[in-house]
Amino acid sequence: MSMDRREAIKRTALIMGGLVFAPSAMGVLNGCKARPGVDWNPEFFDNDQARFVTVLSDIIIPDTDTPGASAAGVPAFIEEMVFTAYDEDARERFLSGLEAFNDLAREEHGNRYLDLDPEVQFQFADSQNRLAVGGEHLDEPGTAFFLVMKELTMMGYFTSEIGATQTLRYEKVPGRYEGCIPFDEVGKTWAT
């Protein structure tokens, strides 16, 4: 029995607290999927946009005891979502948000995001995450962009084979149903 992709998306939406928005969910349901590997060649993004998406997705989900976003093919997934699932307005908002994020980095640190030291990149992304999650500055395209980028990164990761089988707990044929058990006995959230 293989993992049902639609069911994985529904569960991912629950895990993420309902942060899955219609264009992203529709893109995945229509077949957008992560292509694992770090040898990703962008088809639509220019080189700077591709590097930006790769760097930021790896900050959002870094390599730890499980592979991170790049290893799961998340940057290619994001490109496919933006250029095949998003309509023209959503695509333009994504690309202008990317530029606005760079402009915010330039205002705060004197350089565009890609040209910052990796530690400063992390700190800047962390501050944008805190602002966005706190509901602050969501009228600023750069801060709002971070939420979209985070959503796409998480969706791409947790619907990839790596995310669903190595990060989440996965069994092809799960055992008996136990409705109420302590989380520390399980250890991970279930993928299916």
Image (spheres, rainbow, N blue to C red):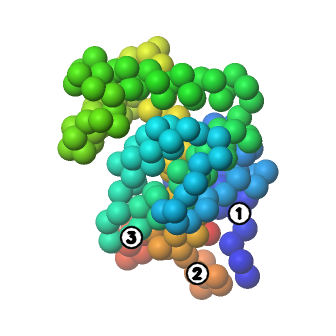
Which residue in the structure is indicated by mark 3?
Answer: 66
Between 62 and 22, the one lying in front of the other is 62
Q: Which residue is drawn at 22% across and 25% down?
A: 109
* Separation of marks 3 and 2 at Cα, in angstroms: 17 Å
Relative to residue 78, is residue 129 drawn left or right?
Answer: left
Residue 160 drawn at (x, y percent): 58, 63
- Amino acid identity at mark 2: Glu
**Residue occupying the point 69% across, 22% down:** 89
Residue type at mark 3 is Thr
**Location of mark 1 (residue):** 5
Instruction: Find residue 180 and report its horizontal and vertical position in percent.
Output: 49, 69
- Residue labelled with disc 2: 171
Q: Earlier in the sequence, mark 2 or mark 1?
A: 1
Residue 154 % position (x, y) = 51, 50
Q: Can residue 89 be seen in this view?
A: yes
Could you say whether the residue bearing mark 3 is in a helix, strand or loop?
loop
> 151 above or below 69?
above
Do tag 3 and tag 2 residues touch (Cβ < 8 Å)? no
